[in-house]
């Protein structure tokens, strides 16, 4: 059983996503699970080899001596992953999935012999608390049980599979012949629970497939991009935390926006700024139940003092998300630091007030009634906007170089006032309509006076600056100005040409040198994929659908073979960058596809 290849974290695009609506795992082409947090998305990882080395935890299952699988796919419209290896001795299929959980999260791997006889090896290296804690492992009649502190993991291995400890991991060596199916089940539970319930992996596979297929059958999009839209909706569903309805930005932390750089963030939380776009994508896609759950999560999260509204929250609305550095990791391909938690939680980001208002307005249009207590809360938020909209903030991009008067933030303050007026008029609920209308007019005039550069003929990133920013595309998207306004058209065209990065779109311009940038960080980054989809949508709006379709197609093509998109793309190395898969990117894809299909009549 020698000759095993050295395991290293794969390229970001090499990873597939499986999940159970409570957490998610990343599975590489080489059959290795290199990232898994249990029991929640934001729990400490027990497999963290993605951010460091083998010793930080992984679970590899593959033919002996093999590297990447020959092919892989999701089974139909599901998150059931099938990886196939063709070897000189035969062919084997490994099916990976996580059943929709009852109380116990499980990761199931079923090995099926397709042809010949193939020698297999499983190597399980559990390391709790982000790769730091090696558990104590004991053997029971049917399981290997790994325990450390509050965590325990139970590995169920079929009878007859030789399983033993070696090199500080648990190995299983076996041979699979044609027609044989050999299941491995890994369960997590609190360490004070002394046993795990019986479980049928084959029945779980059937049920998991049926539930995903049944959910996907509700997709209401029938346009030319249906496959990409449906995979994006499935990904969005997989990033939803079922107990609360919160949707994480991504299941990972600290995958870099530039290999070797410091732009590495923890995205395992729920951002308010995603809220209206996410709600729109879900409603358009035909998934009202998920949209309603997200809406309810939002209302619970923002309850309280409007002056303490945060840009992001935990899965259940937690507010304390302290950022720390995990200095025991070398980082993904040497990209450090690795961060746990996110300091953006303490920033002032005025745009989130507009996002909340737009979300409530979209929900109202969708038939969700405006309850009086929600309206009372919203009026408190509007009082804060009235008092603070003229302040500088850190903005949409969460810069770490001090506050500025960002145009996007001001536009979203206008959105807050505009949607407040519209909701008050539609519902007849008590409201200071005169003040809100005056606020809407004042913000609009301020942005047009100070956010527009007459010399350049475009809207800029911040007052007094001349830099472009893809976030100014929201000026038309939100209705701040009509898309045929010459200022809007020129801004869209300027973003198209001035922020182009190898056929994709940067969010804003960065200096080519490695020193400190305008956002307070060192080094560069890739193209921001959500911005590319925003631009495609904007091009449709200004009457350039062919260019929009080309850009959309190029951006979809940056996805991996399974249709998963990360946050960013490096057009030079042709590699994905940033946390993956990224909800913000997939939401932008869905909304852009609907805009394109509305334009060509294929929706």
Image (cartoon, rainbow, N blue to C red):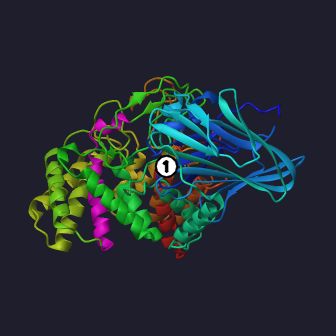
Name the spot of residue 32 as percent of width and height, x first: 67, 41
Q: Is residue 510 magenta?
A: no
Q: Disc 1 marks which residue?
A: 23
Name the spot of residue 199 as percent of width and height, x first: 59, 56
Identify the image quadrant of residue 553: bottom right
Name the spot of residue 152 as percent of width and height, x first: 51, 39
- Residue at left 20%, top 67%? 371
Is 370 rendered above or below residue 299? below
Horizontal side of 407 relative to 599 (left or right) equals: left
Name the spot of residue 115 as percent of width and height, x first: 86, 56
- Residue at left 51%, top 37%? 45
Question: Majority secondary structure of the magenta segment?
Answer: helix
Is 41 rendered above or below residue 293? above
Task: State the count of labels.
Answer: 1
Residue range highlighted in magenta: 342-367
Whether residue 573 appears in this view of the structure is: no
Horizontal side of 327 relative to 154 (left or right) equals: left
């Amino acid at each position: 059983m020698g000759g095993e290849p050295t395991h290293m974290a794969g390229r970001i695009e090499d990873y597939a996503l499986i999940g159970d609506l409570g957490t998610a795992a990343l599975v590489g082409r080489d059959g290795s699970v290199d990232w898994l947090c249990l029991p929640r998305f934001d729990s400490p990882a027990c497999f963290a080899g993605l951010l460091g080395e083998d010793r930080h935890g992984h679970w590899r299952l593959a033919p002996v001596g093999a590297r990447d699988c020959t092919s892989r796919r999701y089974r139909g419209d599901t998150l059931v992953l099938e990886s196939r290896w063709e070897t000189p001795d035969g062919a084997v299929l490994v099916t990976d999935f996580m059943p929709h959980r009852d109380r116990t999260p499980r990761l199931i791997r079923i090995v099926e012999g397709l042809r010949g006889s193939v020698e297999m090896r499983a190597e399980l290296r559990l390391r709790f608390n982000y790769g730091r804690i090696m558990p104590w492992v004991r053997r029971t009649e049917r399981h290997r049980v790994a325990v450390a502190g509050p965590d325990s993991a139970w590995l169920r291995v079929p009878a007859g599979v030789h399983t033993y400890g070696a090199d500080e991991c648990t190995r299983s060596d076996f041979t699979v012949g044609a027609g044989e199916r050999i299941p491995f089940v890994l369960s997590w539970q609190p360490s004070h629970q002394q046993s795990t319930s019986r479980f049928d992996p084959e029945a779980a596979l059937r049920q998991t497939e049926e539930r995903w297929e049944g959910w996907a059958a509700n997709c209401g999009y029938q346009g030319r991009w249906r496959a990409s839209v449906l995979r994006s909706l499935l990904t969005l569903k997989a990033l939803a935390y079922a107990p609360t309805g919160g949707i994480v930005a991504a299941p990972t932390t600290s995958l870099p926006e530039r290999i070797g750089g410091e732009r590495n963030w923890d995205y395992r939380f729920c951002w308010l700024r995603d809220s209206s776009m996410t709600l729109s994508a879900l409603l358009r896609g035909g998934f009202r139940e998920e949209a309603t759950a997200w809406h309810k999560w939002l209302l619970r999260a923002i309850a309280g003092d409007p002056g303490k509204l945060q840009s992001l929250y935990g899965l259940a609305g937690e507010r304390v998300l302290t950022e720390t550095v995990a200095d025991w990791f070398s980082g993904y391909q040497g990209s450090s630091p690795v961060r746990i938690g996110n300091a953006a939680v303490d920033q002032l980001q005025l745009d989130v007030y507009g996002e909340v208002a737009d979300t409530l307005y979209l929900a109202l249009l969708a038939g969700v009634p405006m309850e009086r207590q929600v309206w009372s809360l919203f009026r408190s938020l509007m009082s804060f906007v009235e008092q603070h909209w003229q302040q500088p903030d850190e903005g949409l991009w969460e810069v770490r170089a001090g506050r500025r008067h960002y145009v996007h933030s001001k536009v979203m303050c206008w959105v807050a006032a505009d949607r407040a007026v519209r909701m008050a008029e539609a519902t007849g609920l008590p409201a200071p309509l005169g003040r809100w209308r005056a606020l809407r007019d004042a913000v609009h005039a301020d942005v047009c006076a100070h956010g527009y550069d007459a010399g350049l003929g475009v809207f800029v990133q911040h007052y007094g600056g001349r830099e472009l920013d893809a976030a100014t595309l929201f000026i038309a998207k939100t209705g701040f100005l009509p898309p045929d306004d010459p200022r809007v058209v020129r801004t869209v065209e300027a973003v198209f040409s001035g922020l182009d990065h190898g056929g994709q779109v940067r969010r804003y311009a960065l200096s080519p040198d490695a020193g400190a940038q305008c956002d307070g960080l060192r080094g560069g980054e890739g193209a921001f994929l959500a911005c590319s989809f925003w631009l495609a949508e904007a091009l449709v709006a200004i009457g350039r659908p062919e260019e929009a379709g080309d850009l959309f197609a190029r951006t979809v093509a940056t996805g991996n073979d399974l249709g998963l998109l990360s946050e960013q793309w490096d057009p030079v190395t042709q590699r994905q960058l940033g946390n993956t898969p990224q909800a913000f990117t997939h939401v932008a894809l869905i909304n852009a596809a609907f805009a394109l299909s509305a334009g060509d009549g294929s929706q």
